[in-house]
């Protein structure tokens, strides 16, 4: 039976979240089970008006998509972290933020990054800039994340290393790349001293 591994409901304390999990896109670490979400549970600094992203475990995805091709992402649709508008596709969400929230500068979590399996993204200072830098150039968040994660440290990549990329944006370096690259890959040895070069 699939669960959301190592996630506890901040409403009831249940550590065995089955099926649906609701992740707050404005609180750094706040998750609710379906029951607490339906009851509109509010605790700590979490406010019910905060945007929440529904995430599915593997069993819920199989049930929900019933024989159709299942997405790799753990969400069927995406919630705007700024206004809470629901039902966006990946592309629609990026376009919505570009058109409606270009000047928003509050802290939010990227719902596209949150839906990557095993992801644990941080709060962002500028969701519009994050989308522009990471999610705008490709319709698939995983292809983009995979390419960036695999290009780190190559001559083709403008990224100096993992900390410079993930630091201000997301901490989902555990996401597995899906698309193979035609370019050679070279990895950075983080244990060496940069002054030795």
Image (tube, rainbow, N blue to C red):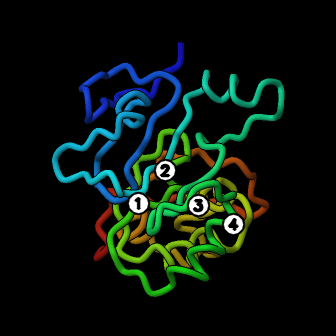
Cα separation between marks 3 and 2: 27 Å
Q: Comparing marks 1 and 3, which lies closer to the viewer?
A: 1
Q: Is label 1 in contact with label 3 (beta carbons under 8 Å)?
A: no
Q: Comparing marks 4 and 2, which lies closer to the viewer?
A: 4
Q: Is label 2 in contact with label 1 (beta carbons under 8 Å)?
A: yes
Q: Give the residue drawn at x 71%, y 40%.
A: 71
Residue topped by disc 2 = 114
* Residue density around tag 1, few if under 14, some if 14–19, many if 20 or more, within 10 Å: many
- Mark 1 or mark 3: name the one nearer the start of the chain: 1
* Residue density around tag 2, few if under 14, some if 14–19, many if 20 or more, within 10 Å: many
Q: Which mark is residue 109?
A: 1
* Residue density around tag 3, few if under 14, some if 14–19, many if 20 or more, within 10 Å: few
Residue 13 percent across, percent down from the top left: 24, 26
Q: How many numbered badges does the structure rendering display?
A: 4
Q: Is label 3 in contact with label 4 (beta carbons under 8 Å)?
A: no
Residue topped by disc 4 = 92
Q: Which mark is residue 186?
A: 3
Q: Comparing marks 4 and 1, which lies closer to the viewer?
A: 4
Q: Circle 3 sits in a helix, a strand or a loop, which is it?
A: loop
Q: Quadrant of residue 181?
A: bottom right
**Where is the C terminus found, in terms of image quarters?**
bottom left
């Amino acid at each position: 039976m699939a669960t959301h591994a190592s996630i506890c409901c901040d409403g009831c304390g249940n550590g065995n979240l089955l099926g649906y999990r609701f992740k707050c896109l404005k609180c750094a670490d706040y998750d609710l089970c379906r029951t607490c979400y339906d009851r509109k549970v509010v605790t700590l600094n979490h406010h019910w008006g905060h945007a929440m992203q529904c995430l599915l475990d593997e069993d819920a995805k199989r049930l929900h998509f019933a024989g159709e091709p299942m997405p790799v992402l753990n969400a069927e649709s995406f919630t705007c972290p700024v206004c809470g508008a629901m039902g966006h596709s990946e592309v629609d969400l990026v376009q919505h933020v570009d058109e409606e929230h270009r000047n928003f500068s509050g802290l939010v979590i990227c719902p596209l990054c949150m839906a990557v399996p095993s992801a644990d993204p941080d709060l962002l200072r500028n969701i519009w800039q994050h989308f522009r830098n990471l999610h705008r150039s490709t319709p698939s968040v995983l292809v983009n994340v995979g390419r960036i994660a695999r290009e780190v440290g190559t001559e083709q990549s403008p990224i100096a290393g993992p900390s410079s990329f993930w630091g201000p944006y997301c901490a989902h370096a555990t996401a597995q790349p899906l698309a193979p690259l035609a370019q050679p890959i070279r990895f950075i040895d983080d244990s060496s001293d940069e002054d030795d070069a």
